């Protein structure tokens, strides 16, 4: 089913975020895109951006990746890495 496919895609993103020691969230939109927020060490955030731009989940087809509002923070504002529905 479609719902299971979407959950599977997001779980790959969750796993990658956790593997890199990041916190944040991801969510599929009705328009077929994924939005989210990631926080953590700058080098790991950059690695996640590359993964999201080039690889993603096995069933995803990435045509464009856009990253906005990047800023330095004093401490993490989120905890865990979650999929929002």
Image: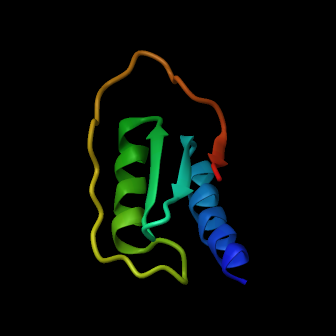
Query: Residue shown at 60%/71% (left/top)?
Result: 9
In the visual, does 68 lie left or right of 8? Answer: left
Instruction: Tell me if residue 67 comes above or below residue 2 in the rendering.
Output: above
Colouring style: rainbow
Instruction: Tell me if residue 4 comes above or below residue 75 in the rendering.
Output: below
In the visual, does 15 lie left or right of 37? Answer: right
Query: Residue shown at 42%/74% (left/top)?
Result: 55
Instruction: Tell me if residue 74 comes above or below residue 22 in the rendering.
Output: above
Front position in the image: 20 or 49: 49
Q: How many marks?
A: 0
Residue 33, percent from left and from top: 42, 66
Residue 48, percent from left and from top: 42, 55
In the visual, does 1 lie left or right of 37? Answer: right
Residue 75, percent from left and from top: 48, 18
Farthest-out residue, front: 30
Dividing the picture into quarters, in which one does residue 54 lie? bottom left
Q: Quadrant of the N terminus?
A: bottom right
Query: Residue shown at 34%/67% (left/top)?
Result: 53
Residue 59, percent from left and from top: 54, 83
């Amino acid at each position: 089913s479609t719902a299971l496919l979407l959950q599977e895609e997001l779980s790959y993103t969750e796993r990658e975020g956790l593997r890199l020691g990041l916190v944040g969230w991801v969510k599929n939109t009705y328009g077929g895109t994924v939005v989210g927020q990631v926080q953590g060490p700058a080098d790991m955030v950059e690695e996640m951006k590359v993964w999201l731009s080039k690889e993603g989940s096995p069933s995803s087809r990435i045509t464009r990746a856009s990253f906005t509002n990047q800023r330095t923070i004093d401490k993490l504002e989120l905890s865990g890495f979650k999929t929002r529905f």
